[in-house]
Image: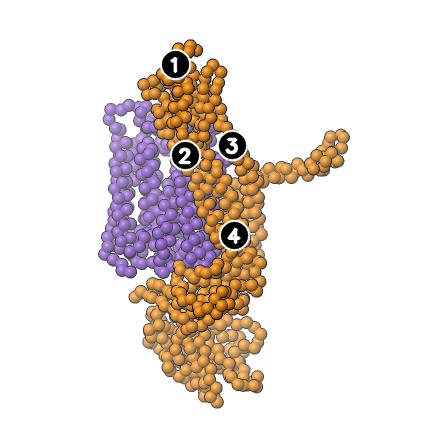
Chain colours: A purple, B orange
Amino acid sequence: MGVDAPLGDFGDVLFYSALAVYILAMLLHAVEHGLLRRAEPVAAEVAVPVAVGAGSTESSFPTAGGEALPRTSRPLSERFGRMGVSLTVLGFGLHLAMLIVRGVAAGRAPWGNMYEFTAAVCLVGVGAWLVVLYRRPELRRLGVFVLLPVILLMFLGGTVLYTQTAPVVPALRSYWLAIHVTAAVISSGILLFAGVASVLYLLRSVHDTTGRMAWTAKLPGAQVLDRVAYRATAVAFPIWTFAVITGAIWAEAAWGRYWGWDPKETTAFIAWVVYACYLHARSTAGWRGQRAAAINVVGFAVMVFNLFFVNLVVTGLHSYAGVG
Amino acid sequence: MTDTLEKRTDPPSGSSSPGRDVLAVARNTWRGLTSMRTALILLFLLALAALPGAFLPQRTPSPQAVQNFFTQHPTLAPLLDRVGMFDIFGTPWFSAIYLLLFISLIGCLVPRTWEQVRGLRARTVAVPRNLSRLPHHAAGEDDRTPDEVVAAARTRLRGWKLDVREEPDGVRTVSAEKGALREVGNVVFHMSLLALLAGIAVGKLFGYEGNVIVMADGSEFCNSGILAYDTFRPGLRVDGTNLSPFCLDVDHFTAQYRPDGAADSFAADVRYSDADALADGAPPVPTTIAVNDPLRFDGERVYLLGHGYAPQFTVTFPGGAQRTLATQWEPVDQRTFLSQGATKFDRPGVTDEAERRRTQVAITGLFAPTSSGGSVVTSTYPALTDPEVAADVYEGDLGLDSGRGQSIFAIDQSMVDQGRLTRVVRQNLVPGQTISLPDGTQVRFDAVKEWVNLQVSHDPAQDAVLVAAVALLVGITLSLTIKRRRFWVRVTPASPSTTDRRSLVQVGGLARTDQAGYGEEFERLRDDLLRPRHGGS
């Protein structure tokens, strides 16, 4: 199994280009956020002025953001925001190309070590964000907060976790690598976005109840954030379940048992239970709203812990990081 | 029964009685246990209880790591051990949490399933009086008669659960529901969880796992009982007497390595005879076991989990008695397969016990499959290209009769400390070389054999667990993607007169779970049902 090293290096160039473009996009979104005035609320806030958990949740997303305020020219903030989105799309393209190049160079699915895994999770995170943007353009102002964790993760991936293009160990040489890890990547990426939405929801609802943290007033309304977080988690949870089940199937073939409480398996189980908690909490009186959102944030923390701590600190069967 | 109990114990005064209290406590406990809040807390506790399992080594997958933890933290480890921190998933408190959770789940699931069965047969909910209060609603005039509008709605709402009702004054209504599969998925998901737990429990009761090291030189392993294994982990109802008989000959082991020493592939060529073949005397079936590719037959699974080297030595004792042994040595470096071990010889044909225990021989030290060639033996590559042993030859009493168990990879250090076992020679050997001990004993390094570590796994419920897991996945996907939604139509004659054929059509919609996303579907339905030229109001 040959490895094309120069091609792999080209993949690294693409990785850093994508990272640079994301940083630029985040800065543009930051400018957009700075230019926003409170007096220019998203339509959702007009439609749903009530705070967290206030009785009925039977209201819909607004269909469009700008209908209520006819304008002749676009305000500066919107122009910056649109530039940010364009750059995000460009970064996404570079990012995608990086993974393809890396996969071709190594002759396998490009998520065989933590550097590649982190890159792939970030790609899905940005992809999920672009899908949300396409369907709810009025959420664009979230850009800076979505790109920030992506950039942090990619930075860590490019420095601490970086590994040269190489084939994987025999235990990973299986079509389950493509299936199991792809599912894990997709669900983690979407849950990354859901986690960000829940964090913003919590901040926003603190503002709604106490009036502190005035900057969050520029965010979309609490209920919009809550619903986006829920929808993302509801999509990701079955995929995560699929990832755990295919992991068990693969473990049965590779290690002789479908479940053995390996640290990675344990943490995947914990994350699964926490997200199950979130989904239940959201439909339980007295728990929906802030408590549910807090659980979602905990779930995301467990996912991050699973990625970094379990792979780098704990020794287990999943120690494939290729680091150190 | 409740009645009689109450009648018998209830004093006429009507004050609370012990019997009633007990009942009330039981009822409240049951209600409390099956409430969503309790289930949530139990779920959270389950996650919390599992958390130490991510930080601390656990005995079940890695007993060695637990031992290391004990040597690193001599004071902390016993304390943690007392509360079961190294065996979390088998502790009573962990079991208590998930058992309570599953009782709570059953208490929640049974009534819900009933409700759902009734709901599937029940008629749809009648049209609300005031449709304009719904989150989605519209109204319009139509030049068709109410009957025609209702017929059109029926056609358009094909696939929905439908009920057409009549209200006074010739008003016709259609109530439609869709998405009942969401609840079905929900119930299937939770039922599958129960089935999954049951399957896991059956596996823990009737399954077993055994590990055995077999020389890859045609040696045979037979699944005859616990003694055939090096380690054996039986299920709670397995005593090792009724293992299904099969035999396995390991003919050859192949490993391929990359230039940097990382492994590329492992495979063992084996021949196996299942129970029928053994009974009929049929020839064994040749096959290959590799990583990710175990041997499966008749509910048995055989895995290739590891491999290593066994240097073979021949010891010629003074007087000419010869013994040849190849004992597995343990790889200490997975990258270079530098291995250590102890090959132990008992002098044959000696009747005097004291004499026998003075002349036992052990060869310990390091083995390098590809030696660096220096005076200190180190290994540079895992394949068997240039083997060399740095041998420490001990002579004396190995302590094999002491009654204490000893590692097959090391000599009993206490015998050395007591001076009953002494190192007589230290020398590096390549295959074919011989060393002489002071008493005339000759030790020859003959060759190197390879061994494989096989695991035999047996779990009668494994397929059931897989089915439960797939059902669980289908259930959760249905329950999280399908939306339950309702659509209502009320058609009112525009005027009481029979000549006026026009109707007034009102439509309303409600999503019962998450409103987002229903808007578009409602709008399509509305546009199709309200004639556009009359639409809007």
Q: Which residue is farthest front?
A: B280
| CA distance for labels 1 and 3 | 35 Å
How packed mark 3 is, by other alpha carbons closer than 10 Å (few <14, some 14-19, many 20 or more), is few
| CA distance for labels 2 and 3 | 32 Å
How packed mark 2 is, by other alpha carbons closer than 10 Å (few <14, some 14-19, many 20 or more), is many
Marks 2 and 1 share the same chain: no
Q: Are marks 2 and 1 in contact (CB under 8 Å)?
A: no
- Residue hosting label 1: B501
Q: What's the amino acid at mark 4?
A: Ile
| CA distance for labels 2 and 1 | 45 Å
| CA distance for labels 4 and 3 | 35 Å
Helix, strand or loop under label 4: helix
- Residue hosting label 3: B121
Q: Quadrant of residue A171?
A: bottom left
Between B284 and B326, the residue placed more toward the observer is B284
Helix, strand or loop under label 3: helix
- Residue hosting label 2: A227
Label 2 resides on the chain identified as A
Q: Quadrant of residue B292?
A: bottom left
Between disc 1 and disc 3, whose residue precedes?
3
Q: What's the amino acid at mark 3?
A: Arg
Marks 4 and 2 share the same chain: no
Q: Residue at x 56, y 77 (%)?
A: B401
Q: Can you say whether B499 is above or below A260 in the image?
A: above
Position of the N terminus of chain B, as image quadrant, is: top right
Q: Which mark is residue B368?
A: none
- Residue hosting label 4: B200
Q: What's the amino acid at mark 1?
A: Arg
Q: What's the amino acid at mark 2?
A: Arg
Q: Is residue A305 left or right of residue B355?
A: left
